[in-house]
Image: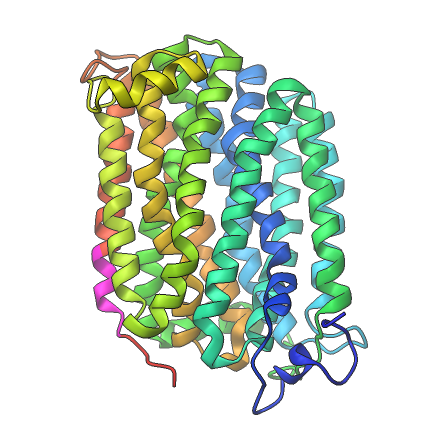
Amino acid sequence: MILTAAPEGPLAAAVRPAPRNLKQLDFVVLSLYWVAIGYLWTSLGGLILPDLVLQLVGRQHEGLALGVLEGVGSLMAVVWQPVAGALSDRTRTRFGRRHPFILGGTIGDVLFLVGLALAGSFGLVLIFYFLLQTASNTAQGPYQGLMPDVVPEAQRGTASGYFGVANVVGVLAGTVGAGLILAHVGRTAAILSICALLVLTMLPTVLLIPDRTERSAGQFKSVRQAIVTTFGQPLRYPSFLWLMASRLLILVGLVGVQSFVFFYFSNVFFHNDRNDTITASFTLQGLVIVAAFLVSWPAARASDRYGRRPFILVGGLLGAAGVVMLVFSHFQLLPTQLVEPLARMLKVPSLAAQATLVGVVIGIGYGLFFSVDWAFMQDVIPAKEAGLFMGFSNIATAGSGIIARFVGGFLLDPFNHGPQLLGLPGGFPVIFSVFSVSLLVGALLILKVPEVRIR
C-alpha cells in the first residue's frame, strides 16, 4: 500500500522541506473524506431535512422552519470550525495534530445522525442538528488543514481537481443515491447510509495519511486568545478576504437553489406528490453534479497554466444564467424534441422536465468554481496556519447556507401567499432572482483577488 504511516513514502515526503510529488493513489486516499462530507450535507440539506420539515410542521410554515433550522445549526459551523482548525494547528499528540479531531468528530456525527433519525418533534430535530454541526465541524476544520500539510505547492492544481471531483462525487451520491434510498426505503435508511460512508472514509484518512507536521505555535492559553487569534489573523490578508467574499456570494446562489428546489417542484408541478417531487429534485441536482464532474478535472489542471480567476469568474456567470432560467421555467424555453423524451422517461410534465435540464448549465458553473477553489485558497494563505485559515473559510461555506436559507425562507412564504409571478407561485421568482444576483456579484468580486503563480 502506498499510503502508510512509515517514515518513507510520497505522503511522508510531502511534509519535508522539499517534498516529492504525490502519486495518483495518494490523491485518491487524501480526497476520500470529501466524498462523505459532500454526501452528508447534500442529502441532508437538499432532501432529508425538507422532507422532515414537511412532515413535522406542514406546508404553511415550511420556509420559516427550514430557515430557522439551518440558521441555528450553521451558526455553530461558522463559529466552531475555524476554532477547531486553529486548535489542530497547535496540537501535539502521539496520534498527530489532525487525526484526533477527525476521529472524534466523525464519531459524534454518527451519534447525532442517529438522533435525527429517531427525533419525533421539530424541537428535537433542531437540537440534534445543532449537535451534528458541532461534531462535523470538529472534523472538517482539521481535515482541511491536513490536506495542505501533505500536498506540495507545485501540485495544488492537481490536488484541487481531485478534491473538487471527490466533492462532486459526494454531492452526486447524496443527490441521486440518497434520493433513491429516501424515495424507496425511507428516511432512516438514508440517514444510516450517511453514517456508514462517514466511517468508511474516515478510517483510511486517519490510518493511511501521515500526520506528523509539527504544530505551528504553542497552544492557546485562554479562550480569549483563541478567539482573537482565530478571527483576527485572517483579517490581515486582503486577498484572502476578497476570495472569501466571492466564495460566500457564489455559494449563496448554489446552496439556495439546492435548498429550495424540493419546495419548487412540490409547489409548482406536483402539488404535494412526494415521490414525483423527490424524483424531479434529484434529477435536477443529479444533472448539476454530472455536469460538474465532467468539467472539474480538466478545469483544475488548466488553472495551473491559465490561472484560477478565469474559471471562478465564468463558473459564477454560468451559475447565474442557469438560475435565471428557473425564474422563467413556466415558459417553453427549450425545443420540444429535447424536452419530451426526458418528460416521458421521468413521467413528469414537459415543463418540469425542462426545469431539470437547467441543472446542466448550473452544473458546469458549479464544476468550474469548485475545481479551482481549494487551489486558489492555498495560493493566498500562510501554509503554517492552514487549519486556521481553512477553518475560517468555512465562514463563507456555512455562512452561505445561513444567508441562502434565511433569506429564501423568509421571502418564500409571504410571496407564495400573494399573486403569481411569471406563472409561478410568487416566492420562487423572487428567491431565484436573489440567488442569481448573488452568483453574478460573487463572480465579479473574484477580479479583486490577484493571481499568485506557483513555480
Q: Name the foreground residue: 281 vs 385.
A: 281
Image side of residue 103 versus residue 454, left or right = right
Q: What stretch is highlighted in magenta?
A: 444-450
**Residue in view at x 54 percent, y 46 percent:** 169
Q: Choose top left, top right, bottom left or bottom right for residue 335.
A: top left
| Res 100 seen here | no
Q: Is the magenta stretch mostly helix, strand or loop?
A: helix
Q: In this view, does 90 lie above or below 340?
A: below
Image side of residue 106 versus residue 304, left or right = right
- Residue 426 shown in magenta: no
The location of residue 142, given as percent across then percent down, is 62, 65
The location of residue 83, given as percent across then percent down, is 57, 64
| Res 109 seen here | yes
Q: Choose top left, top right, bottom left or bottom right for residue 257.
A: top left
**Residue in view at x 43 percent, y 58 percent:** 297
The location of residue 270, given as percent across then percent down, is 41, 10
Q: Choose top left, top right, bottom left or bottom right for residue 337.
A: top left
Q: Quadrant of the N terminus?
A: bottom right
